[in-house]
Amino acid sequence: MKPEAFAATRDNARPLRLFWLATLSMFMIVSQALMASAQGAPQSFSVLAEKVSPSVVNITTSTMVAGRTGPQGIVPEGSPFEDFFREFQDRNGGPGEDRPRRSSALGSGFVISEDGYIVTNNHVIEGADEIEIEFFEGFSLPATLVGTDPNTDIALLKVEADSPLKFVSFGNSDNAKVGDWVMAMGNPLGQGFSVSAGIVSARNRALSGTYDDYIQTDAAINRGNSGGPLFNMNGEVIGVNTAILSPNGGSIGIGFSMASNVVTKVVDQLREFGETRRGWLGVRIQDVTDDMVEALGLASAEGALVSDVPDGPAKDSGMQAGDVITSFDGKEVQDTRQLVRIVGNTDVGKSVRVVVNRNGNSETLLVTLGRREDAETTFPASQEVTPGEPSQSELMGLTLSPLTQDLREELSLPDSAKGLAVVNVDESSEAFEKGLRQGDVITEAGQSEVLSISDLETKVDEARDAGRKSLLLLVRRGGDPRFVALSLEEQN
């Protein structure tokens, strides 16, 4: 190429290169802006910490516990260390004395009103004789216990102060999203007021409680943080730090805070009544599994399957075992855990509409809720067994026998128990795979009571004639009912 031609080509390419460079620069600027917006990382938590710190408190409790006599249980008798431990105990209570001693524990909490109401965990103050509150400004006040709720591990305390106290407000925990920044405050390992930050790692976690609704966070939470607040970036409390998952007792970034929307309802009741007053429907329920969908005539495995209806509000409304609750007070029911929370958060004495699926049809029942704390479990009686039944029969991998008085005594069942006793289970059968065992009692099949083997055979035939591939059985073990769907395809 001639020099003149090369120069001309280079000159023509310059505007194009400039265009692409400008485009690339603009792309990088926009990308960085989007990343910064997505991360939302604050430059500092100092402003938030300064704002909320005066409302966070350290809690010290003390309890009188019985002393121990001698070194028994500490070292084996005759051990070379026995004299050492006896001397140690003598210095702390005297030889042979069973002198009570005072034990202390530490925790955290936060003020929710200027007149001195304080929220913490129940396990922080449980069994305490004295509760001392240390405030961020350096002064301390004794606290009295207003009420507790072991189900959610929440306690409400009260202090009397000469002037209004600084307090924080609850936020809406339902607005917290996975990835949002949060800040935890408390008294970790007894080190005094401390701040840690992280993000919301997960929502709607359940640990072991009936009303669990935990926010999981990677903000450092250690012993002593229990009862402290979890703040959103607006300085609102969206959780109460309650538990950690850890192999060594220290924080590994898996902490759990009880969601504020659960806590606020508990606190309001403790403040007003000194106790909780949860709604009570009066049913035993279980989740609907995929293998039950066809047997129940449902479209999907959603709702809460009623396995028992003892005396109570639900029974008074006409609810039956085998009903599937699909809606409660206008809220769609996904599973049993959700239903328990919805019912518990509904006012005692309120009349609500409950939609159930019964034998493939939708029915609406009006139920007036009782109070769960006052509920007593009772079980309805059944009818007598039809005489003349065969002693045993095999169906669906089960060896069954009508309940007799001898069987009731052998299985430790009450005289009122009715149904078919499972005498044996074929270990290669679907029934064994789904947990049926010798000693179980089948009380219903196809949502109808079975008092004899012929009753069960009739329900099998009816289900097969209706084109169903499975049959729903209500099985009781030790008085606890559950539904199990067994396939009919292999039955002859």
Image (cartoon, helix red, strand yellow):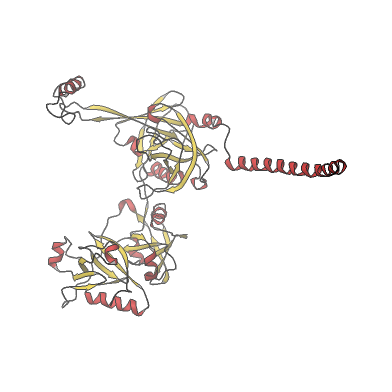
The residue lying toward the viewer, choosing from 180 and 365, is 180
The residue lying toward the viewer, choosing from 447 and 110, is 447
Q: Residue furthest bottom?
A: 465
Counting from the top left corner in percent of width and height, residue 278 is at 37, 51
Q: Is residue 29 visible?
A: yes
Quarter of the image that includes the C terminus: bottom left
Counting from the top left corner in percent of width and height, residue 203 is at 46, 47
- Say if 138 sits above or below 403 in the image: above
Q: Is residue 418 visible?
A: no
Q: Is residue 471 left or right of residue 404?
A: right
Q: Residue at x 30, y 68 (%)?
A: 473
Quadrant assignment, res 31: top right
The residue lying toward the viewer, choosing from 429 and 399, is 429
Q: Is residue 436 left or right of residue 414?
A: right
Quarter of the image that includes the N terminus: top right
Quadrant assignment, res 398: bottom left
Q: Residue at x 49, y 35 (%)?
A: 197
